[in-house]
Amino acid sequence: MKFKILFGIVLLVPVLMFVQYNIEPVVVHFYKWEQSAPLSLLLLGALVIGILLGMMLSFFRRRKKAKK
C-alpha cells in the first residue's frame, strides 16, 4: 500500500510539469461538434477515461472468475 502511494506521488511531479508546459488551447472537432480546450486538460481527460475503462474491465474479469 505504501508503495502505491509513493509511486503516485513520484508520478505526480512530472504530470504537474506537463500540465504547466501544455496550456495552449487546441480545437477538437467531433462530427459537427467543435470545442476548444487546453491540450493538457484534453490529454489528462483521455488518461482518466482510459484508467476508468481499465478498472471496469478488471472488475468485470475478476467478477467473472469469482462466479466460476
Image (cartoon, helix red, strand yellow):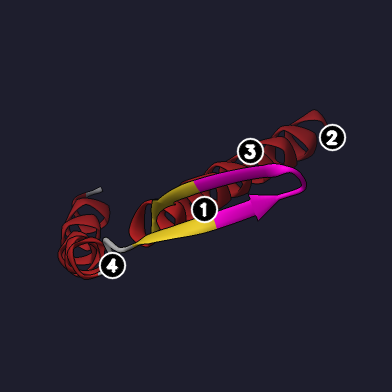
Q: CA distance from mark 3 to mark 1?
A: 15 Å
31 drawn magenta: yes
Q: Position of residue 65 (x, y in %)?
A: 77, 40
Q: Residue at x 60, y 46 (%)?
A: 34
Q: Earlier in the sequence, mark 4 or mark 1?
A: 4
Residue 35 drawn above or below residue 10: above
Element under label 1? helix
Q: Amino acid at mark 4?
A: Asn
Mark 2 neighbour density, 10 Å: few (under 14) some (14–19) many (20 or more): few
Residue for badge 1: 46
* Residue displayed at 20% across by 59% down: 12
59 and 29: which one is in front? Answer: 29
Which span is picked out in magenta?
28-35
Outermost residue, right direction? 68
Q: Are marks 3 and 1 in contact (CB under 8 Å)?
A: no
- The residue carrying pointer 4 sits among few (fewer than 14), some (14 to 19) or many (20 or more) residues within 10 Å by Cα, namely few
Circle 4 is placed at which residue position? 22
- Alpha carbons under labels 4 and 3: distance apart: 29 Å
Is 60 contained in the magenta span? no
Tell which of 20 and 14 is nearer to you. Answer: 20
> Which residue position is annotated with label 3?
56
Circles 4 and 3, Cβ within 8 Å, touching? The answer is no
Front in this rendered view, residue 56 or 67 = 56
Task: Give the number of the mark in front: 2 or 3.
Answer: 3
Q: As shown in the figure, which amino acid type bears the numbered disc 2?
A: Lys
In this figure, which residue is indicated by the disc labeled 2?
Answer: 68
Work out whether mark 3 precedes mark 1 in sequence or the reverse, and give the earlier one.
1
- What's the residue type where badge 3 is placed? Met
Cα–Cα gap, marks 2 and 3: 19 Å
Identify residue type, mark 1: Ala
